[in-house]
């Protein structure tokens, strides 16, 4: 079959707050071919992401992403890999292109899975998918007391692992941060895994990170996530050998495979975290998972929004039996919950399983999403290059 | 003074060809404050670059670039550095942001220089600027015969160094490429520097690169530029120790400082090439130049378009006496030539000197650019978020 249409939808909550919650809007992609539809999401700013699809060509290596996609054949996994390769050849000077490609690549895998009647992870070469242990991923409270309450609630919900991130952390002094780390541990009790996500606040400042190591160790933190700017290899490396040692996790900011490979080679990480909605989709994420497996490093999904994005994020490492940890959004906005009619829910043992149905295995709730659609129009000269289609 | 307005202009040649010539369009930035105007250029796809300035906020780390700029104080260099820092803190999940910031940062330096009556390189801390030896930067011919003719012409024009890039190179077999390398050397004669730019065609394929090393060495190539994808550290590293050794140059694809630092640390480069129109502007490029100087590595500007972009690209290393090589566009489109009323031209010795006038030292030719302006309109919901202003 041939790709007939690629449509982007900018979905948004009525109010978007200045908080570290990426589920307040979405860049949803719909691809149609052979009477079927595939769906994907870019974990990206919707307007520049759409612009990167429809912009006029600047030169041979700065073409719109549409160049690689429209009218192309889609019959087997090699077709999807060729489309990614075409984007990398013809759009590598268009910075936003990888974020745009991400949602397209995911939608192509969903579509191909539906055509072939297979879940995506089968098409990736995995014979079976293993259950994952979700960690509840949520924001720190504004105060240590609020962090404590959130930890108590998360623990009571049955999660074996909980991650706190963003909010006030790293923006105040080390003593104030330590109160949050301790509150999280006390709220969770001693038996659950606790992870801490700094959200790159310290940029390249290893001193700031080193000042918090003792408090992180005292709170028995399982990993410290994104203390620094993505690709700040020197800062990561230095922190990885600082005492007391705390395991490092990072990688969600990588927008292509070679960046993730560099982080695996030189940042001193124990966990490589990949967002399929940013790295160029499932195709690039699977390459990272293969490399991580070959090196004995742990692959973890990064995802914070809808269950469509969650399913996409699980596919690249669904068949890696030993990599059992997975991020699971526990407090997304209603938009993210309304994205699909079905969801991936923890079972009685607190484990989740990737859908076994064709494609990503979830149904996009087009009716329920209507109220979130923000109509976009982009005009270049005399030409209307983008107008939101009907969802 | 306070920043009063930031305006983007999408300029384009009547026809844009599918060739490796980035001067066919431009994203020009005008910033006004205190009765003065500063100008900059993003070496980027104009439409996504504008979208990254005006898009609505997605979350706390995915804000439009405008958040960091509009209404901010501009009285000293620290104000520009703070704006860059704000973009990195509040827009790091917006991939295109660094390309948008680049033109803004350049315009801010131009504006501050005009206010303080100083050329930008003085504000960067350089007491004096040293003459640079320009290399003529141009595309390979479609055939070895055409490459030979171009080499003869470039040599006859008085350039001591000539770089050929893109075109057919790397897309055919090694023997065909070798004919081009030899034609370029024969056309130039034995005494001039010859550089070769692959334009990342081999991605991560070290075999493809290694097959060309002997022919590159036989043609006495001074450096081999961008054989691989930006940040493909492993491939660069391997090639840097392959026999026969050829010096490696890369870095133009870096969109922030930490990526350039990673390339300097791990890619086995001898030359770090920075495009101020992509890395976040003069501020980030100066950090790279400082690091390169501290490590005894050679900094080279990357630029292929207007003389406004050329001046901006020279500022970060204007005062580095030993880094004398500079890229100089010899066959830009008329749009790039029309960008300014004055130009930076080689003297009788074939050397160029950065302007000593305030700011970037060049005057934007607003009248002559009118015919290239492409009117853009972007509407989000009920709101018109961007409409091309008058130039």
Image (cartoon, coloured by chain):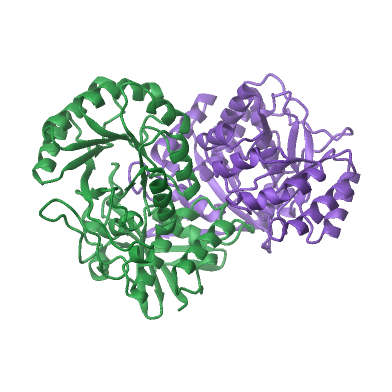
Chain colours: A purple, B green
Counting the numbered discs, the total is: 0
The x and y percentages for residue B339 are 25, 62
Q: Nearer the viewer, residue A169 or B286?
A: B286
Q: Observer-nearest residue: A241 or B94?
A: A241
Q: Is residue B23 left or right of residue A322?
A: left
For the point 68% across and 63% down, which residue is it?
A17
Question: Residue A344, position in %: x, y?
Answer: 77, 38
* Residue closer to the observer: B103 or B160: B160
How far from the left and from the top, in percent, is residue B40? 36, 63
User: Which quarter of the picture shows residue A289?
Assistant: top right
Residue B157 horizontal side relative to residue A314, left or right? left
Is residue A385 visible in this depiction of the protein?
no
Q: Hey, which residue is sitting farthest left in the picture?
A: B156
Up the image or down, B323 lies above or below B145; here it is below
Instruction: Give me the residue at 48% from left, 41% from top.
Output: B262
Residue A208 in the image: above or below residue A190: below
| Residue B252 seen in this snapshot | yes
x, y percent for residue B336: 25, 57
Picture quarter with the C terminus of chain B: bottom left
Residue most extreme to the bottom: B35
B147 with respect to B303 (left or right): left
Q: Quadrant of residue A273?
A: top right
């Amino acid at each position: 079959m041939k790709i007939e249409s690629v449509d982007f939808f900018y979905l948004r909550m009525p109010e978007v707050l200045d908080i570290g919650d990426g589920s307040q809007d979405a860049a949803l992609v719909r691809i149609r071919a052979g009477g079927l539809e595939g769906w994907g999401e870019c974990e990206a700013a919707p307007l520049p992401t759409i612009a990167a699809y429809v912009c006029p060509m600047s030169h041979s290596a700065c073409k719109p992403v549409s160049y690689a996609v429209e009218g192309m054949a889609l019959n087997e996994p090699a077709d999807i890999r060729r489309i990614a390769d075409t984007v990398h050849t013809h759009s590598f000077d268009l910075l936003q292109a990888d974020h745009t490609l991400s949602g397209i690549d995911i939608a192509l895998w969903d579509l191909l899975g539906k055509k072939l009647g297979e879940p995506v992870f089968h098409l990736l070469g995995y014979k079976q998918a293993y259950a994952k242990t979700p960690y509840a991923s949520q924001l720190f409270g504004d105060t240590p007391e609020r962090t404590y309450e959130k930890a108590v609630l998360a623990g009571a919900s049955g999660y074996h692992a909980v991650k706190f991130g963003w909010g006030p952390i790293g923006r105040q002094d080390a003593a104030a941060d330590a109160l949050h780390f301790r509150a999280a541990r006390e709220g969770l009790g001693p038996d659950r895994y606790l992870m801490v996500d700094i959200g790159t606040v310290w940029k390249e400042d290893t001193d700031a990170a080193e000042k918090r190591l003792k408090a992180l160790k005292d709170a028995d933190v399982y990993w410290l996530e994104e203390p620094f700017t993505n690709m700040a290899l020197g800062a990561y490396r230095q922190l990885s050998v600082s005492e007391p040692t705390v395991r490092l996790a990072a990688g969600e900011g990588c927008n292509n495979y070679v960046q993730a490979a560099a982080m695996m080679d030189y940042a001193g990480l124990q966990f490589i975290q990949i967002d399929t909605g940013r790295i160029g989709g499932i195709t690039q994420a699977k390459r990272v998972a293969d490399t991580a497996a070959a090196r004995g490093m742990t692959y973890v999904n990064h995802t914070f929004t809808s269950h469509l994005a969650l399913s996409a994020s699980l596919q690249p490492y669904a068949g890696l039996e030993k990599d059992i940890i997975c991020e699971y959004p526990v407090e997304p906005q209603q938009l993210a919950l309304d994205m699909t009619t079905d969801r991936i829910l923890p079972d009685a043992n607190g484990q989740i399983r990737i859908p076994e149905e064709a494609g990503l295995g979830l149904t996009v709730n087009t009716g329920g999403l209507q109220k979130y659609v923000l109509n976009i129009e982009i005009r270049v000269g005399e030409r209307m290059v983008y107008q939101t289609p009907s969802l």
